[in-house]
Amino acid sequence: MEFIEKYDGCGLVIKIRKKLAEATKIQKVEIFETESLGKMLVIDGKVQVTEFDEHIYHEMLVHVPMNSCKDARSVLIVGGGDGGALREALKHDLEKVVLVEIDRNVIELCKKFLKIENGAFDDPRVEIVFEDGKKYVESCEKFDVIIVDGTDPVGVSDPLFGRDFFELCAEKCKVFCSQSQSPIIQRDLFRKMLQNSSVIKNRSVFISAIPTYPLAIWSFIIGGDFSFKYVERKFKRIMGKTRHYNPEVHFSAFILPEWLKEEIRNAGRG
Ligand code: AG3
């Protein structure tokens, strides 16, 4: 059996050994055992996590904002029901992390079959809330860092890409970070994200190669009171706990090629 995810007629083929679990209440959530990439989480036909490269995505999504924030003691993760972002956040010296996930099945199946969270769901600093992420942010207290770990902006994740959501988040945190799709093969989604997130002060883009995501070039947006000046010092506290992330990787993720700079400039005009 093969799993295929296509974008504009080209894409990724992954050989499957067997399907381990499936649920279809809010989204179609599937967990597979693959031939060569370990276990894999797929939501609505889109690869979310493989054991092969999830550390790259989760470390970039979490340590870049965490190490850019002067003193991050509280974190809100919107989405991220597989627990990968939560696992990374807990490597920092935190008082609390709230994870708000709309789909209970994602957490339940991932805990049982994917098992990448490394005990994170049971950590006393963690609170799990089953709710729509945007609704939660409308009435929550302030956090030092907000991290958005959603799926593609079609279906339940769509509100997490809207201007009003970014406006809310800008008020509720010091540093904001969200995954923002493939800037090369999902240009429309990326552009929409850029346009809507321009309400966040100092909004910047960084990139990373994530081999199992659409065409491997993946983007993230970050904004608020973030700075490069804390990175080296804060890295020392998590040194030895990361497989991909380090300060050089952090800084180089912000070095963008011309075509991407142009895309960002164009979105500014749109
Ligand atoms: N969510 C963002 C990845 C989306 C991938 N999109 C795709 N394959 N079309 C990742 C969630 C992991 N915690």
Image (cartoon, grey):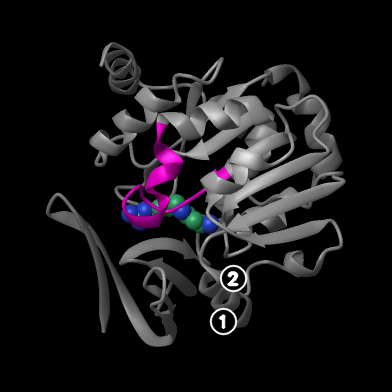
Q: Which mark is residue 69?
A: none
Residue 259 shows up from this direction: yes
Which quadrant holds the N terminus?
Answer: bottom left
Q: Are marks 2 and 1 in contact (CB under 8 Å)?
A: no
The residue shown at (52%, 61%) is 102
The picture quadrant for ligand 1 comes to bottom left
Q: Is residue 95 left or right of residue 244?
A: right
The residue shown at (53%, 67%) is 51
Locate residue 70, reporting x and y percent.
79, 24
* Residue with the most extreme left position: 9
Locate residue 27, reporting x and y percent.
39, 68
- Magenta highlight range: 148-162
Q: Which mark is residue 113?
A: 1
Residue 68 vs 152, above or below: the answer is above
Residue 116 vs 99, above or below: the answer is below
Q: Is residue 198 left or right of residue 261?
A: right
Q: Secondary structure at mark 2?
A: helix
- Whether the residue under disc 2 has CB within 8 Å of ligand 1: no
Q: Which is more toward the observer, 103 or 111?
A: 103
